[in-house]
Image (spheres, coloured by chain):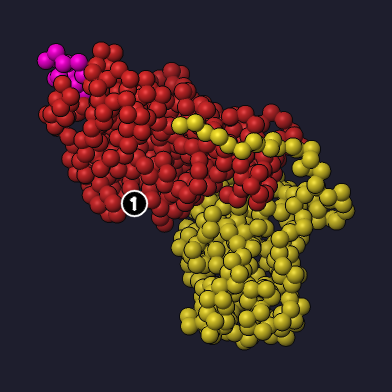
Amino acid sequence: MGKDVLTGEHFIHGDAACAEGGIAAGCRFFAGYPITPATEVAERMARRLPEVGGIYIQMEDEIASMAAILGSSWGGVKSMTATSGPGFSLMMENIGLGMMTETPCVVVNIQRGGPSTGLPTLVGQADVMQARWGSHGDYGCIALVPCSPQECFDLTVAAFNFSEIYRLPVFVLADEMIGHMSERVVIPRKADLVIVDRPQPKVGKDKYLPFESSSHMPAPMAVTGQGYHVHVTGLTHDERGYPVITDTVQERNVRHLVDKIRRNAEKIIRFETLGIEDATVVVVAYGCTARVARQAVENLRGKGYKVGLLRLITIWPFPSALIRSIAGRVKAFVVPEINYGQIAYEVERTAGGAAEVLLLALMGGSIHSPEEIEEGVAEFL
Amino acid sequence: MRVRCRKLQPFNKEAADDVIQKDHGLHPDDKYLKPGRIPHIWCPGCGLGVVLTTFIEAIRRKGLPVDKCAVVSGIGCTGRVAGYLDMDTYHTTHGRAIPFATGLALAKPDTSVTVFSGDGDLFAIGGNHLIHAARRNVNIKVICVNNFNFGMTGGQAAPTTPLEAKTSTTPTGNAEAPFNLPAVAHAAGAVYVARWTTFHPRQLVHSISQSLDKKGFTFIEAIAPCPTGFGRPNKLGSGLEEMRFYRENSEIRNGIDPGLAEIKLRGKIVVGTFSDVDRPDFLENYQNNVVSKVLSKGDKPGKGRAA
């Protein structure tokens, strides 16, 4: 058997780091379909999973890939898939099933330019809203955005942990620039990794409620073969898992799916700041754009301007309270992103008119230059 | 923004369990059915009850412990089968029972995974998944209940609707030729292929039992009456009359090329076990061609290799 945690220093790209993060977190099943720029995640998994007692399977499409990882998760195995925009669209149907059936798993999306086939080999960040709202109906979701290959590893581990704690598919929303960028990645010792194992039911079959919704946490999950005989359905269901097509059960069912994320948002939200304490203008950025934004902010601060950086690591749930708390004391937020306005809308919404918002939009295929961001900030200096 | 919701009515397990009928357990099959789930939703004259019963009988006959069985279904009338069985059951999305079951079967190779779904689910929206699971020879048992139409949505044309048959979306008669399901499954690589009607419960039990013994992708088509959806526009009469039709028009031809078993509206129905072969399933091939080769290279994990 090969090593599951490749402790040490590596020079690998973000896609490979996502795969290693998954394996280190305990992922032993990967179902996927080749798609640029996420294919390298699958290639790494195809080579590595059999070394550690796992299974890699190449499915007939992304719909099947998503369905298969839900099935293996209910078989008690930590599971993931990786894709890019067009495949992410196809996965939406069974992402909804995963949300409704509270199934832990991880979906890596290495974003490229869209819509449709768009820019297969070039960067985009336009799947942010699709990650939040892509499947029909209401549900809460978690999306983590790495800005380096190191974070591809770290956040894939974190994504698995969140998926087990909150019982849902969790997104790692990387982008082509990060996925294909090779950098130093330090994989810690196995003993130093925080890995959440799946909580197990503690009561017998007659008392167990697999879809308990009275607290804002999911019930422990009984998987196939444990004797609980759980019925798992995408239909609106009561706490036993039985389909009940009524408004009262729908009310409990959907509010549970949303509230388990909404009420725990503080525990899920991660971010990084640079100089926001004294800033009059704050740049809000994520993913590859945050790397350029950092350069721009450092350049401006070097010239004595009071500019800060808020780098979003958790993008969903959105850190609304944080933006609100900053909005009252700054003149403006500058939001560079590789789309025509997605996170900028969230910033504007949560700032509630207390600060101006400037979107620095790129449609995809390239990243901002530090100068472009500096020019945007300069409007408010 | 502030949010105001309607007051939640908390779940009351005692009250919910109270609804579970007092007579659960009186019928010998009840130990295979989830308490409180019967009566089922199916129409009078529907053939689904017969097929469910034959599945239970096959499990009983094989002595399979229910904790070693799982059933996965898609959407539609047949999709509701999963919810009635007292075992681990998964009612997935439309057409996706097979890929879900693929993940489950690979994660739990010691569990017998059966996919129970309808012709529309498995051959229209799910057709691609079916042929690929058969090609891979994933260890799942497929029972496809064919009622020649989309029943749950009220009787629309399916990929099984015979040429010229009437449905709510083919009011003047179907202009498309149907799939011959056993031929498709066989061509795609299924290791066991059979077709019976609900007039053949004993043969169905036998075939399901045989399929449970097989390692790999098996396919059983169970032709079933749908008096509400398919029967009415085609003037086929009640479920009972449809059963009479099956009795008079079924022709048992075990071992024939399933390509010769096409179904025409009001024509003969060729039934039987069409193929029963052995070839390595996905996991055996994966073990032999991937795992053993990777491990025989010794303890050389990916470290240091070019990413």
Q: Tell me which residue sits at (84%, 55%) in the image.
A: B28
Q: Residues within 10 Å of mark 1 (few under 14, many from 20)?
A: some
From the top left corner, tell me how far across and down residue B161 is, in percent.
Answer: 55, 77
Residue B196 point in image, percent of width and height = 67, 73
Please identify which colour was used for chain A in the image.
red
Identified at 75% across, 49% down, the residue is B34
Q: Residue at x 87, y 52 (%)?
A: B23
Q: Is residue A315 left or right of residue B45?
A: left
**What's the amino acid at mark 1?**
Pro
Which portion, as a residue range, is magenta?
A294-309
- Outermost residue on the front side: it is A353
Residue identifier under label 1: A86
The quarter of the picture where residue B38 lies is bottom right
Query: Does the stretch in magenta take in A256?
Result: no
State which chain is coloured yellow. B
Name the chain letter of the residue that bears numbered label 1. Answer: A
